[in-house]
Image: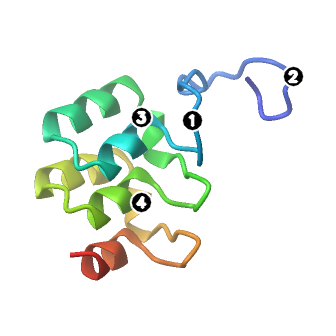
């Protein structure tokens, strides 16, 4: 639905499943739990708009992938799908690179 509640938009990712808390998409959840490269590829292929969705903490799926030790290949898929994620800062002003350094 449109942001103002007036009706549907042309965004193919407007039908992302509602999150159960914190604004997470299935891709956020998968990245948080250290999923496989195949699952990341599948989720990105089905809902590419999830790459740019921020959760309640301002984090993108890439933030979680980096903080949870995702493979370089999985991180590459996330970055290729949404390059601006590299510079995105969460509520603590941390980029995905900060997460990778801080939590490894």
Q: Are marks 2 and 1 in contact (CB under 8 Å)?
A: no
Of pointers 3 and 1, the one earlier in the residue sequence: 1
Residue found 26% across the figure and 80% down from its top? 101
Q: Position of residue 35 (x, y in %)?
A: 21, 43
Q: Position of residue 61 (x, y in %)?
A: 40, 51
Q: Are marks 3 and 4 in contact (CB under 8 Å)?
A: no
Q: CA distance from mark 1 to mark 4?
A: 23 Å
* Residue on which disc 2 sits: 6
Of pointers 2 and 1, the one earlier in the residue sequence: 2
Give the number of the disc on residue 20. Answer: 1
Q: Secondary structure at mark 4?
A: helix
Between circles 3 and 4, the one closer to the viewer is 3
Q: Residues within 10 Å of mark 3 (few under 14, many from 20)?
A: some
* Residue on which disc 3 sits: 26
Q: Secondary structure at mark 3?
A: helix
Of pointers 4 and 2, the one earlier in the residue sequence: 2
Q: CA distance from mark 2 to mark 1?
A: 24 Å
Q: Secondary structure at mark 1?
A: loop
Between circles 2 and 3, the one closer to the viewer is 3
Q: Are marks 4 and 2 in contact (CB under 8 Å)?
A: no
Residue found 51% across the figure and 43% down from its top? 24
């Amino acid at each position: 639905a449109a942001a103002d509640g007036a009706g549907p938009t042309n965004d193919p990712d407007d039908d992302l499943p509602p999150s159960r808390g914190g604004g997470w998409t299935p891709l956020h959840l998968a990245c948080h739990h250290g999923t496989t490269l195949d699952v990341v590829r599948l989720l990105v292929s089905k809902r590419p708009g999830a790459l740019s969705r921020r959760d309640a903490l301002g984090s993108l799926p890439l933030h979680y992938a980096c903080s949870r030790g995702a493979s370089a290949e999985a991180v590459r898929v996330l970055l290729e799908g949404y390059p601006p994620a590299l510079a995105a800062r969460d509520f603590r002003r941390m980029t995905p690179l900060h997460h990778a350094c801080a939590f490894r």
